[in-house]
Amino acid sequence: MKQNSRNILRIIVVLAIVATMSIRPLGPVKAASNTPVYVLGVSNPTDPLIIDLQNLTSSVTILTSVTSLTTLSTSSILYIDGSWLASISSLDPTVIPTLVQAVLAGLPAVVVRGNPAILANSISGLLKLQNPGLPLIAEGVHVIGTLTSGTRQGTLLRVISGFDYSVAAEFQWANQQIAQLGAPTTFAPLATTAQNSKPALITQVSNGPYWRFILQASTDTGTAFKPNGQVITTFTVYELQNSGSTNFKWFNIFSNQTMIPGTIVFNSNYRNYIETAFSHPSDQYNTYVSNGPPSQFSTNSGSVSYSIGTQNSTQSMSYFLKNTNVTNTSSSPNVSWVHTIDGQTAAGKIALQVIPGWTDRVVQTQPLNIQGNVTVTFATFNNSQPTNTALTGVAFGIGGN
C-alpha cells in the first residue's frame, strides 16, 4: 500500500491511438485497468514496453502495420516505438501523416524511445513544448479540437527520465484524456471576468472578448533528480478571442510547478525549499503585458490570488500555499518569481503546487514564442537550517501557432 501511494503521487499529470488492425493479441493478464492498448513498432512480446503495459492493463495488442489506424477507437491508447517510427518514416513518407490524421481524429498517442517528439512536432497548428538540454524518454499527444484558424487544441505530456516510470505515467495521462470531455480542468483558471461559468474549451458571453483553451503541456522529471525530488511543470495556455484588434493577439500562460520532495517519492530526507520560475519573450514580436501573483508574505497557510489578461478580459487564478513566501522579481521584458518554503515545517514534506501566470501580447502575423526555466531546490535540514541543497532545473520553450 505504501508503494502504491508513492506511485499515485508520482503520476500527478494531466493530459493514443488505438483499435483493430492486423493484430496479434497477447492474451489476458491481471492488471488494474482494462483500457485497450495497442503497440506499433514492436514485434517481440517480451519487449520491456510490452511487459510494462501488461502490468497496467489486461488488454495489450501488438499491431503489425498502420494501414487500419482510422478504425481505432478513441477509448483506446496507442504506444509507438520512436526508434521504429524514425526508421520506417524515412523509408515510407506516408507513415507519419497517417499517424497524424489518427491523432487529429482525437486519439491519444504515446511515443516511447528514440525521438519521442517526432509525432507531436509533425502536427501543424499545435503549440510545441521543448526542453532544451534535457533528455526525453516519452511524449504523449492528444488533440481535442481544431479552430477555424487551424489552431489545434491539445495536451502533451513529456517525461525526461525513467523508462518504466514514463510508460506508467503516460498510461495514466492517456486514461485521463479518454475520461475527460473537452478541455482539461486541472490547473485551469478559476474564473474569467467575461463569464461566471467554469473554463472549458470555449468561455464566451455574447459576442464580446473571451478566452479559449489552446494547450496544456507538462514536463515530468520522473527519476532524473532521484533522490532529491521530482518536479512536474504544466503550462496551460489560453488565447483571447474577439479582441477587436487586427494588430495583436493575446495569450494567457499559467505555469504550474508541482514539487514532490524526495521524502515522499524516493524515501530520502530531501524536502521542499526554494522554487524559482523565469520566462522571457524569444523575439521582439512577443511582449509580456501583465503577470501575477505579486509579492506576498505568509508565515502560515492561505491562498494566493491574482488576475491576468487585457483591459477587455482577464482570467483569475488562485492556489494554496503553506508556510511559503512569494516574491515577484519580474523586470521588463521578463517575468520571474521566487517561492521560499519553510522546509522544516509540514510544507517541506508535501506535494506543493505554485502557479504563477502572465499575458503575452503577440504581433498578429507572428507566432507565440517564449523561453524560460524552472528551478526547484530541495534540501535536508538540521536544526531548522538547510543542508545538502540540490538544484533541479528544467528549461522550456513554447512556440508555434
Image (cartoon, rainbow, N blue to C red):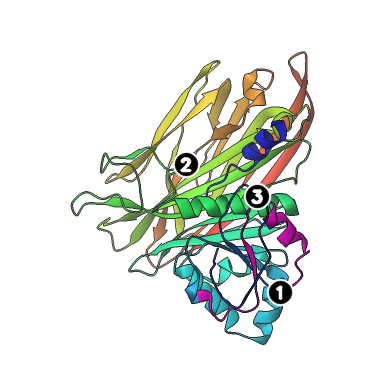
Residue 86 falls within the magenta-colored stretch:
no
Give the quadrant of residue 244.
Answer: bottom left
Q: Which residue is mark 2?
A: 187
- Indicate the position of residue 188 as horizontal and vertical percent values: 43, 43
Q: Is residue 268 left or right of residue 355?
A: right
Instruction: Name the residue that disc number 1 marks.
Output: 84
Badge 2 crowding class, 10 Å Cα cut-off, few under 14, some 14 to 19, many 20 or more, is some
Residue matched to label 3: 31
Q: Is residue 325 above or below residue 121?
A: above
The relative height of residue 8 versus residue 367 in the rendered view (above or below) is: above
Asked whether the beta carbons under mark 3 and mark 1 sit within 8 Å of each other, the answer is no
Q: Disc 3 versus disc 1: distance between alpha carbons?
A: 27 Å
Q: Measuring 27% from the left and 55% from the top, which residue is drawn there? A: 243
Quarter-wise, where is residue 305 in the image? top left
Callout 2 amino acid: Phe
Rendered residue at 69%/40% (across/down): 230
**Residue found farthest to the front:** 28
Q: Earlier in the sequence, mark 1 or mark 2?
A: 1
- Give the CA distance from mark 3 to mark 2: 29 Å
> Secondary structure under badge 2?
loop
Q: Is residue 198 visible?
A: yes
In the rendered image of this protein, does residue 334 appear above or below residue 42?
Answer: above
Dot 3: few (<14), some (14–19), or many (≥20) neighbours within 10 Å?
few
Write down the region rendered in magenta.
43-69
Q: Could you tell me which residue is drawn at 47 percent across and 43 percent down?
A: 186
3 vs 2, front mark: 3
